[in-house]
Structure formats: C-alpha cells, structure tokens
Amino acid sequence: MRAIAEYIMRGRKEAIIVATVSAAIPMMYWVSAAAVTLVVLRKGWTQGLALLFWAVLPAGVWWVIRNDPTPMLVILGSTVLAHVLRTTVSWVYTLFAGVLLGLILSWFLPLLLPDVLAAFVSMGNEFLDQIAAQTGSQITEKLKEILPGMFSGVLSAAHVLSIVGSVILGRWWQSLLFNPGGFKTEFQQLILPKTVAVPVFFVMAFGGEVNPAMLGWVPVLGIPFVVAGIALIHGIVALKKLSLHWLVAFYVSMFFVGPYLTLLLILLASLDSIFDFRRRIKP
C-alpha cells in the first residue's frame, strides 16, 4: 500500500492514473477515493478537485452503463470529508459530517437505487409474512410501513462506511509518507464529546418510539460510535502494550458476530465519551 501512496505523490500524471484506473475497475473505487483524499489532505482543495475530475469520469460511466452510482457517491463523499478533515483537523467533525452526508443520501438513494431498495424491501416483507403466518401477529403490517425507510438507512450507512474507510486509508497513506505514526496516535485518541454523543445515543435508542421513521437514521447515526469504539479498542491495546493478536481476534470476531459486536461498540463509545476510559487506564 505504501508503494501506491508513493506513486500517487510522485506527480499529477501518476495520481490521475491511479484515480482513473481504480475507479474503472469493479469494486476498486475505494482506492480512487483514497487517492483523491490523499491529494486533498496533502496538497489542498484545488489540486484535489483537479484529480476528482478525472476520478469521476469512469465512475460516471459505471453509473450510466451499469446504473450503479456507488463509485461516484463514494468518491465525491470522500473528497468532501477529506476537505473537512484538512480544514478542521478533527475526526469528530469529519465523522459527523459523514453522518450528515448519510442522512442526505437516505433521502436520495430510493431515487438512485430503486431496484436494489425494492429487492431488500421485498425480502423483508416475505420474512415478515412468514412471522405473521407462524404467530398470527398483526404488528408485521406496521413494520412493513417503515421497511423502506429502514433499508434506505442501511444502504446509506453502507455508503458512508465506504466513504469513511476511504478517508481513513488516505489519511493513513499521508501519515505513512510524511508523518510516520501520526495517524496511529490520533486514531487511538479518538473520543466523541459527550455533549454530542449522549444526545445522539438517546436518539438512536428512543427515537423510534417518538417517530418510527427515525429508525432509518439509526444505521447512519451509529457510524461515529462504531469508529470511536474501534479506536477505543486500539487505544486500550496500545496503553496496555498487548499483543497484536488481540486486535486480530477483535477483527475476526467482527466478521463472525458483527451485528452484536457493533451494538457493543456503540455502547462502549457512548460510555467512553462520559468516563474517558483511556485516561483512567494505567499504562
């Protein structure tokens, strides 16, 4: 990965090659997004926009030919968050800017990906019909009404995760080349301020009781908490000087019990915003 970053920083032509080729290859658009992120973080908004122009060309072709706007959305979103990170020098602002992007996307994805959303809703309705047939419950009809909003939120969260992941990769590249260890330190110290984390946590936990439509916000609102929770795990491992096998075990468990571990990370990040566990742990 370092070789890719060095090649991008070699010159404008090299950066264009990486951004356009990776955007044209299926499922490699995140590399293009990370390349634009690296240029924005290192050289500024103006040069980043110049590279963005070349990156969105193949992404636009994917949108037209395959009706897939995801590469375009991820590359554009990563560029915006990279600018936020460069301007604010704050991962908290950057993550919640990603939440704002996700909430906006949740409104437009039904228009951009109607077939994908319809397929998810159809599967959800079939599952609810099976439950209703077995239990005779009528609550499934109410759940069917909010399924489109919920799945729109899930799709939006998936896009935001790709965007945030690309920005993280671009920032790691920048640290690797120009500030070794810088990203590691700032990521391990990431903590959400309680003035924001606590209200958002209560919206996720109880917003659906106030308005069922708010359930669609939960996947997007949870992203900063998941990232902060992962940062907490990394910070504790570093403070206690534990073996990297602990991190390997953590990410393996994410693969097998992802949904349950995600809920735990959200809870840990919320509590960490109040108690600051890393400050209390002895090295």
Image (tube, rainbow, N blue to C red):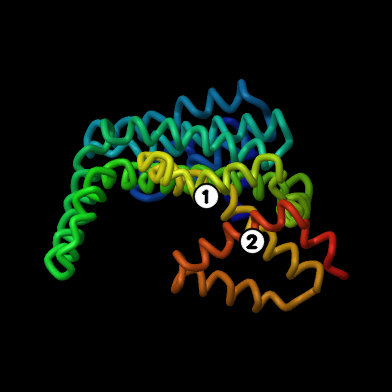
**Where is residue 101 shown, x and y percent of the image?**
48, 33
Query: What's the residue at 69%, 44% (across, down)?
Result: 174
Residue 222, disc:
1
Left or right placement of residue 37 versus residue 147 in this view: right
Q: Is residue 29 visible?
A: no
Examine the image and state in which quarter residue 7 appears.
Answer: top right
Q: Report crowding for label 2: few under 14, some 14 to 19, many 20 or more residues within 10 A (C-alpha).
A: some
- Extreme residue toward the left, this view: 133
SS label for mark 1 = loop
Task: Give the amino acid at mark 2.
Answer: Leu
Quadrant of image for the N terminus: bottom right
Establish if 224 lies above or below 129.
above
Left or right placement of residue 186 versus residue 111 in this view: right
SS label for mark 2 = helix
- For marks 1 and 2, the one nearer the N-term is 1
Query: What's the residue at 64%, 46% (across, down)?
Result: 198
Residue 268, disc:
2
